[in-house]
Amino acid sequence: MIDLKLVRTNPELMKDNIKKRNLDVDFDAFLLMDKKVLEIRQRLDEMKNQKNTFSKMMGTLTPEERTKKLEELKFLGEDQTLLEEELKLLEKDYFDILYRLPNFLDPTAAIGDDDG
């Protein structure tokens, strides 16, 4: 499996690796999708934390405050559903490229068009 941490911190290594292998992989598109996937996942985590915080405080609220918080939770849930759908669609293309990324070449491997 590809070390995504290395790919994110030093994308030139992967670009060079793709070039050496003569592969047709849109790595720049992958980097953009990777950034977007990370952003969406982070936002979803924030939403889940927010929902958990709301749930914990519900017992301490007045009926009016509870009604207001429930309404906020409803909208938060709708936003969360939309983000999850967006993530699902994005991940299809993201994983398609990720699975085509080559492993890094051994530094002692010969570079060329053929095996011999």
Image (cartoon, rainbow, N blue to C red):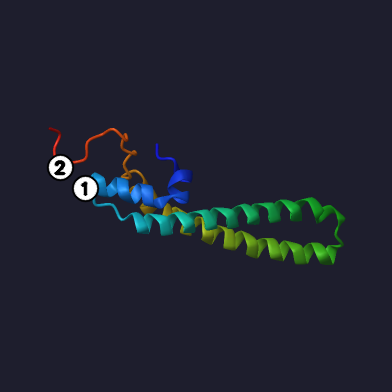
Q: Secondary structure at mark 2?
A: loop
Q: Mark 2 or mark 1: name the one nearer the start of the chain.
A: 1
Viewer-closest of 73 and 15: 15
Residue 8 position, x and y percent, is 46, 50
Occupied quadrant, residue 72: bottom right
Q: Quadrant of the N terminus?
A: top left
Numbered label attached to residue 86: none
Relative placement, left or right, of 67 versus 41 is right
Dot 1 crowding, Cα within 10 Å, few <14, some 14–19, many 20+: few
Amino acid at circle 2: Asp
What residue is rendered at 21% in x and 40% in y?
111
Residue 97 position, x and y percent, is 34, 50
Q: Is there CB contact under 8 Å for labels 2 and 1?
A: yes
Numbered label attached to residue 22: 1
Dot 2 crowding, Cα within 10 Å, few <14, some 14–19, many 20+: few
Q: CA distance from mark 2 to mark 1?
A: 8 Å
**Residue 33 appears in the figure:** yes
Viewer-closest of 45 and 98: 98
Relative placement, left or right, of 23 versus 3 is left
What residue is rendered at 84% in x and 63% in y?
63
Which residue lies under the disc numbered 2?
Answer: 113
Amino acid at circle 1: Asn
Residue 15 position, x and y percent, is 33, 51
